[in-house]
Amino acid sequence: MPRKLTAAVFVSLDGVMQAPGGPTEDPTGGFRFGGWTAPFDDESGQRFMAPLFEGEHDLLLGRRTYDIFAGYWPYHQDVPVGAAFQRVNKFVATHADRPLEWENSHRLKGELPEAVARLKASEGRDVQIWGSSTLYPPLLAAGLIDQMTLIIHPVLLGNGKRVFGGGEEGRAAPPGSYRLTRHAVSDTGVIGASYEPAGEVRTGSVGPEGEPSKAELRRREAIKEGSW
């Protein structure tokens, strides 16, 4: 049976996902708001998060997120998340030659979409992505992510790495529709929402149908002329 690939990401209202966990986590690009999730952490939000850690999942990580995790979780095995992350396989998307010293770590071989497709087709646990901003656009374009959970915080961060591309990565995720499968709102205003792919983007008109007004026809003509 193919493995399922899910993703979970902390994100701001303007789509930034960089350095949610602490001030020193990822200051690249001059990012100065590391640790922006901490003021919103509470028990009600943790209840939404808990099912994400149920069972055991192998991890798929970009190199920088791997380095962040490897510098923290092996030294915090006294909590369930740290112990689980230590046991499972860590698959790392990287072209760097630096060794992967964390126990049960594996370098993905080949180009990213093809390597992840092979991983999903292999025997083993389901796989989770945490963080790893560079993975989303190519994996979404290849249709390889089965579910995304966004943990949306009520804060605007301006610049920073974005979950759906742009910014430092320069690549945008492809258009598509998604179906909401689970959601909750914490007491601090954090929205947790899980989505599954639901095909192409659907469009239509909002409002009553009928013949366009003369003002609307003039507007459309201005669009064609490039003067709108």
Image (cartoon, helix red, strand yellow):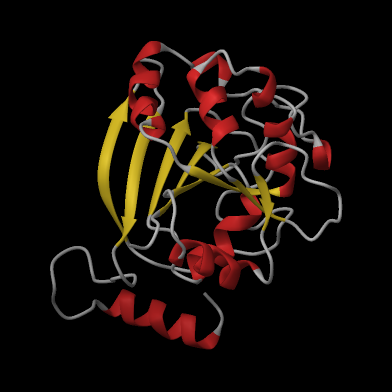
Q: Quadrant of residue 215?
A: bottom left
- Image quarter where the N terminus lies is bottom left
In the image: residue 93, left or right of residue 224: right
- Above/below status of 70 relative to 90: above
- Determine the residue positioned at 32% across, 75% down: 216
- Above/below status of 221 relative to 123: below
Q: Quadrant of residue 39?
A: top right
- Above/below status of 106 relative to 13: below
Q: Position of residue 40 (x, y in %)?
A: 49, 17
**Extreme residue toward the right, this view:** 97
In the image: residue 126, left or right of residue 165: left
Q: Position of residue 139 (x, y in %)?
A: 53, 64
Q: Position of residue 70 (x, y in %)?
A: 71, 33
Q: Is residue 159 visible?
A: no
- Determine the residue positioned at 76% across, 28% down: 32
Q: Position of residue 146 (x, y in %)?
A: 38, 57
> For this rendering, which residue is in front, 26 or 188?
26
In the image: residue 114, left or right of residue 43: right
Q: Is residue 171 visible?
A: yes
